[in-house]
Image (spheres, rainbow, N blue to C red):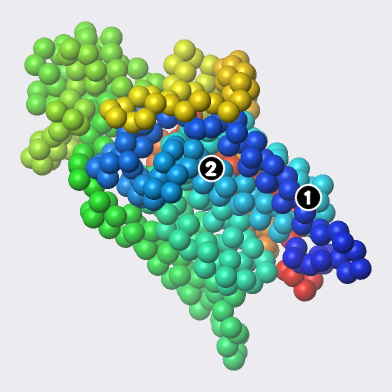
Amino acid sequence: MESRVPPSTIVQGNTFFPDVPPVLAGSLALVFSVGLYFPGYLSFDSAFQFWQARTGHFSNQSPVVMTALWQAVNALWPSPAAMLTLHFLAYWTGLVLLALQFWDRNLPRVAFILGIGFLPPAFVIMGHLWTDASLIAAMTLAFGLTVTGLVERRPFALALAAPLILYSGAVRHNSLLALIPLAMLWAQAVFEALPARRGAPSVIRRRFSVAAIAVLAVAASFGFGRTLDLALARERVSTWALVAGWDLAAISVRTGTMVVPAFARTPGLTLDQLRQQYTPLTNVPVFIGDEHVRYGMDGEVYSDEELRRLRAAWLATIAAHPWSYAAHRADVTAKLFGRYDGDLEGLFFSPTVVPYRDNPPAEAALWNLRDRYAELVRATRGWLIFMPALYLAIAAGVSLWAWPRKDSLTGRIALAAAGSGLLLVLPLTIAAPSAELRYSGWLFVSSIIGLAACGARITRAGRRR
């Protein structure tokens, strides 16, 4: 039981503003982050997306919502650094907002901001212009605004969180599930921020109202992403075909029988060649080379009829060889959540700017520190702190702690944050196209936010809790 001074309160008779140290810490961290990574790392996927933002020739290879946002900020500042800055601005702002609500003392606030903000796996991902980094940024700020609205009953903060919720559910193919716990927390905050009506609603009615608001928020996010995709994408591909082709190649290798349909591979591809190409680390090798599985893009786009046949072959093969499929997916999952100490650096991070078509040459780094930082990351990438399984365990532990306390502020916030990260990675066990660190990006941040919430001193402004 404790009361706290609302974060916005100024100490009377003193020129000291309680919120200055955490805001200053977040501001300095923002400047340092942009300066360190400037203008931002662009892997092939990022370089292709930047080209789309520049030319307006959108593809649905990645969800178009980030490309549309990138096009808007690029019009104001024609550089990848514009999107990098926007990501870090949202990221550090969200952490500052959470810190201001979690504690009423500046030492734990600053420790929280810098401790989570510079968490190695999350900070590595944030230096890239990936949809994964965009999801981390949007979700962090959305959580910060939602918690502010929940704790202080501020409708304006909740209104600001709404477009971020729409964006977050649309920016990654698997982010809609991760949105559900945040939408539930936001719906609870909206319900409690509404003007009180005569007579308290029953528990059942209250829960129904919260669930209805959350369902509408998630549905709106899905509809928003789908509408943008249909309106903007000029080049349409089926990204699930990459997963299907990779799964079929894996089953072929494990069963010793070529199960990749003839129309889905080049005529000369043999089982021995497939054995040499296949790896559970990434799907890329089976789609390249003179003989390969068709990857469904560029000059190898599948027709609608071929997609139907591929889907049927994929599902039928999994049903016929369930143990081979399960072994393949278990191997991918183990590498996805395990240590990143192998030779394929691209699975971990991509400290470069890949040239693509007429994209402008890479801008010079602001500091030589960037190269030294990249070497440090390479030297430490096998460390436990980078292993997603650690954060899975943290999120699971937080969820177990928070569930019996879900009626308290700390319990609700901790459960929402940890649950969001767990739901992000759940679909990866059956749909991950490779074992890349970035796929667990939001899990890193959300699990530690949830852990911090367990020990936070959260009370509603102006009342004891």
Left or right: 414 as drawn, with respect to 168 = right
> What is the C-alpha distance between the residues marked 2 and 1?
22 Å
Q: Residue furthest bottom?
A: 198
Q: Indicate the position of residue 321 as horizontal and vertical percent values.
A: 24, 27
Q: Can I make out residue 121 in this image? A: no
For disc 1, the neighbor class at 10 Å (few under 14, some 14 to 19, many from 20) is some
Residue 49, compared with residue 192, is above or below; it is above
Task: Give the residue drawn at x 49%, y 61%.
Answer: 183
Determine whether the residue tagged by mark 2 lies in a helix, strand or loop: helix
Left or right: 225 as drawn, with respect to 267 = right
Residue 204, compared with residue 100, is above or below; it is below
Look at label 2 and name its amino acid: Thr
Q: Indicate the position of residue 346 as horizontal and vertical percent values.
A: 44, 21
Determine whether the residue tagged by mark 1 lies in a helix, strand or loop: helix
Q: Which residue is mark 2?
A: 85
Closer to the camera in the image, 209 or 129: 129
Who comes first in sequence, dot 2 or dot 1?
1
Task: Give the residue drawn at x 39%, y 48%.
Answer: 75
Instruction: State which quarter of the image contains the N terminus.
Output: bottom right
Q: Which residue is mark 1?
A: 21
Q: Indicate the position of residue 325 as horizontal and vertical percent values.
A: 30, 28
Look at label 1 and name its amino acid: Pro
Task: Give the residue drawn at x 52%, y 68%.
Answer: 159
Choose mark 2 or mark 1, whichever is in front. Answer: 2
